[in-house]
């Protein structure tokens, strides 16, 4: 079963192409939609909700056509917008009850579902206070609650971690995971940080400039983009230790990506050999090779590609900044 | 109300150990899901209650109650006079009451319209409404109906007081019913017209303070300007254009309609009643203003929330 399918989906504004012939097939589960600012994430969600018409192409949500069955789709999906959307002078309870009724729930059910949902997102005594006094974390929880209150089959969460501190971010990501595992609701969650979605999502879709860049299971993703950054010293036998190591690693059958055009301008970048870490053995092979060559190992660290690198072709990929950790931001 | 209990199915999934606050597993909702008509009606009722501060803070009830009291005081006095003087008719017609209370009604419209529409625009709540089964037109229809009903209740209540008081005072029922009916027709036209204008202005001024000011300005400035011009022309013996000038403000438009068709008293200079041709144009302009403001409101909301 496919929850979201798009076919050559395009959205053109007078000046920009927000979506460019996007083909997607998203299965139940938690799917991350990753892209830089302006990549077209919010635009895609609005089209899928039937709120904005596509310029061309088709899209369906839960098997229903977004063009003709918008109201029926919206009955079964929830939406958490990226912006602040809460009136400050009403309480979370009042607001979510109202939104439940706007989703078609009878009054009693709206109240019961509101109490349940607010508890599930972790909002307790605060829920009777006006929302104007809430912290960003609490506001994000209310926004999530109103998206879940009518028990949808699928929710669109547009940058739910926006503005949260690291702890709040982890809480929110955990909550999103539970929306699928405990509540059985499929999730499409957007972010411009690939790293934070890796732990939460079963599947990641990356778009850039409205085009599909990559769509794969999160597991494939991290594996394919994991790399070892290796820096070695020179020795008398090998005046250019970096070059020698690269040759030796290639000979050992590893994929090495260093010395691409443009990388030389980065200070020290020319001295880093980036090895595709296909499996755990890579680590040992590199260490043994360095030892055999008699070079000094300055460092060897696990590194995930930055999101910018995913957007580049492999030829000019290894522009990782010197000393960059595993943070992919 | 047994149909409204929530059917749920317990989920097999247990919350992870230690997560005591989440110890009650998620329950799915298998109950009834109403369609657009229910959503529209719910939004209508919620908005109408909100217009009078019902279900809102005590502070938001003050102004509506105060204004309603001011509205009803004249009606009570009129009834009291009739009862204590054993008169055979009331000293004022219901239509007089509506036209005379125009400034108060304007204040009410200015207070309520921003409350009904500006908040959802200012706090960006529109996307939440639009992500639900309703369409933009449902939102507009519900808000328009709520606003018109609120103005009608506000304007019609003193008329009801007068009617019931008149019956208590043993005035002739047929006369009372007739003038009450005329009054209600005026109330209906008045409410639709002012709902349209008020909501339209409020929907383009999301900042509440601006909305209130803009509505008062739109309702009063043309009204006083037209009245002044009418007076000037009248006293300079240029009576011809006077009846046409009345078309230029919502207040004078209503005034012209009620004196022509609803057995009202004219408050135009010289108490003139507009000619048949002008009267037809008055009705036409009223209809166009109501339909036009409703259509423009829909246009305004076509792009809202995106
Ligand atoms: N109503 C509009 N009119 C014109 N251009 C628009 C409109 N809405 C979006 N765009 C443009 O379409 C592109 C995609 O915007 P979109 O909001 O979908 O990006 P996004 O991936 O959600 O970005 P962000 O991370 O900043 O939220 C951007 O270049 C944006 O400027
Ligand atoms: Mg966005």
Image (cartoon, coloured by chain):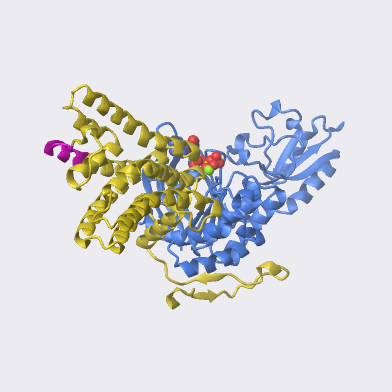
Chain colours: A blue, B yellow
Furthest-front residue in view?
Answer: B85
What x and y, as percent, mark residue B80?
35, 55
Q: Is residue B77 above or below residue A323?
A: below
The percent coordinates of residue B184 (x first, y second) are: 27, 53
**In the drawing, does residue B90 fall left or right of residue A204?**
left
Count of numbered labels shown in the rendering: 0
Q: Is residue B276 covered in magenta?
A: yes
Q: Quadrant of the N terminus of chain B?
A: bottom left
As rendered, which of A245 and A138 lies closer to the eye? A138
Corner quadrant of residue B246: top left
- The secondary structure making up most of the magenta span is helix
Magenta region, residue range: B273-285
Question: Which residue appears at 60% of the width and 53% of the height?
Answer: A130
Residue at image location 46% in from the left, 52% down from the top:
B65
State the residue at coordinates (65%, 41%).
A306
Q: Is residue B162 above or below residue A302?
A: below
Q: Is residue A35 left or right of residue A21?
A: right
Position of B195 with respect to A174 (left or right) is left
Q: Is residue A305 at all visible to an observer of this figure?
A: yes
Question: Is-magenta flag for residue B248?
Answer: no
């Amino acid at each position: 079963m496919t929850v979201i399918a798009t076919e050559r989906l395009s959205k053109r504004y007078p000046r920009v192409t927000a979506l460019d012939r996007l083909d997607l097939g998203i299965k139940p589960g938690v799917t991350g939609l990753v892209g830089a600012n302006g990549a077209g994430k919010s635009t895609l969600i609005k089209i899928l909700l039937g709120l904005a018409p596509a310029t061309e192409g088709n899209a369906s949500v839960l098997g229903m056509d977004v063009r003709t069955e918008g109201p029926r789709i919206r009955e079964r999906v929830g939406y958490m917008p990226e912006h602040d959307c809460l009136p400050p002078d009403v309480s979370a309870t009042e607001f979510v009850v109202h939104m439940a009724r706007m989703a078609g729930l009878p009054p009693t059910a709206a109240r019961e579902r509101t109490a349940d949902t607010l508890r599930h997102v972790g909002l307790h005594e605060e829920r009777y206070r006006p929302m104007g006094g809430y912290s960003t974390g609490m506001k994000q929880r209310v926004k999530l609650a109103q998206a879940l209150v009518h028990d949808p089959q699928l929710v669109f969460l547009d940058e739910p971690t926006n503005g949260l501190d690291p702890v709040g971010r982890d809480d929110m990501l955990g909550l999103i995971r539970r929306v699928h595992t405990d509540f059985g609701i499929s999730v499409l969650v957007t972010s411009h940080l690939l790293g934070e979605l890796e732990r939460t999502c079963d599947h990641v879709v990356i778009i850039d400039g409205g085009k599909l860049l990559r769509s794969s299971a999160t597991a494939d993703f991290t594996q394919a983009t994991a790399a070892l950054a290796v820096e070695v010293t020179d020795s008398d036998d090998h005046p250019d230790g970096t070059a020698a190591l690269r040759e030796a690693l290639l000979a050992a059958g590893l994929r090495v990506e260093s010395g691409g055009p443009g990388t030389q301008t980065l200070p020290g970048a020319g001295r880093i050999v980036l090895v595709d870490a296909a499996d755990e053995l890579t680590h040992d092979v590199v260490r043994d090779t360095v030892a055999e060559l008699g070079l000094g190992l300055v460092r060897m660290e696990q590194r995930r590609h930055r999101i910018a690198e995913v957007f580049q072709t492999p030829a000019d990929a290894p522009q990782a900044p010197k000393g960059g950790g595993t943070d992919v931001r | 109300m047994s149909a409204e209990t929530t059917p749920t199915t317990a989920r097999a999934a247990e919350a992870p150990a230690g997560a005591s606050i989440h110890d009650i597993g998620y329950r799915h909702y298998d109950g009834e899901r109403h369609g657009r008509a229910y959503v529209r009606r719910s939004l209508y009722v919620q908005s109408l209650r909100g217009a009078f501060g019902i279900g809102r803070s005590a502070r938001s009830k003050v102004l509506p109650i105060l204004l309603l009291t001011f509205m009803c005081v004249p009606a009570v006095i009129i009834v009291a006079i009739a009862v204590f003087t054993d008169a055979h008719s009331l000293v004022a017609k219901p239509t007089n009451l509506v036209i005379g209370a125009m400034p108060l009604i304007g204040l009410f419209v200015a207070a309520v319209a921003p409350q009904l529409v500006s908040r959802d625009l200012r706090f960006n709540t529109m996307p939440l409404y639009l992500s639900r089964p309703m369409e933009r037109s449902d939102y507009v229809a519900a808000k328009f109906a709520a606003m018109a009903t609120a103005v009608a209740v506000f304007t019609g209540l003193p008329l009801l007081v007068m009617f019931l008081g008149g019956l208590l005072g043993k005035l002739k029922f047929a006369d009372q019913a007739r003038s009450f009916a005329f009054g209600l027709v005026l109330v209906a036209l008045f409410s639709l017209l002012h709902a349209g204008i008020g909501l339209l202005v409020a929907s383009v001024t999301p900042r509440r303070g601006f909305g209130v000011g803009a509505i008062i300005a739109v309702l009063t400035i043309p009204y006083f300007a037209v009245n002044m011009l009418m007076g000037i022309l009248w006293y300079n013996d240029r009576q011809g254009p006077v009846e046409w000038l009345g078309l230029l403000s919502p207040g004078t438009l209503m005034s012209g309609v009620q004196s022509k068709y609803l057995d009202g008293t004219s408050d135009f200079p010289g108490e003139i009643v507009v000619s048949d041709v002008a009267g037809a144009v008055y009705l036409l302009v009223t209809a166009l203003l109501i339909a036009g403001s409703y259509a423009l409101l829909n246009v305004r909301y076509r792009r809202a929330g995106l």
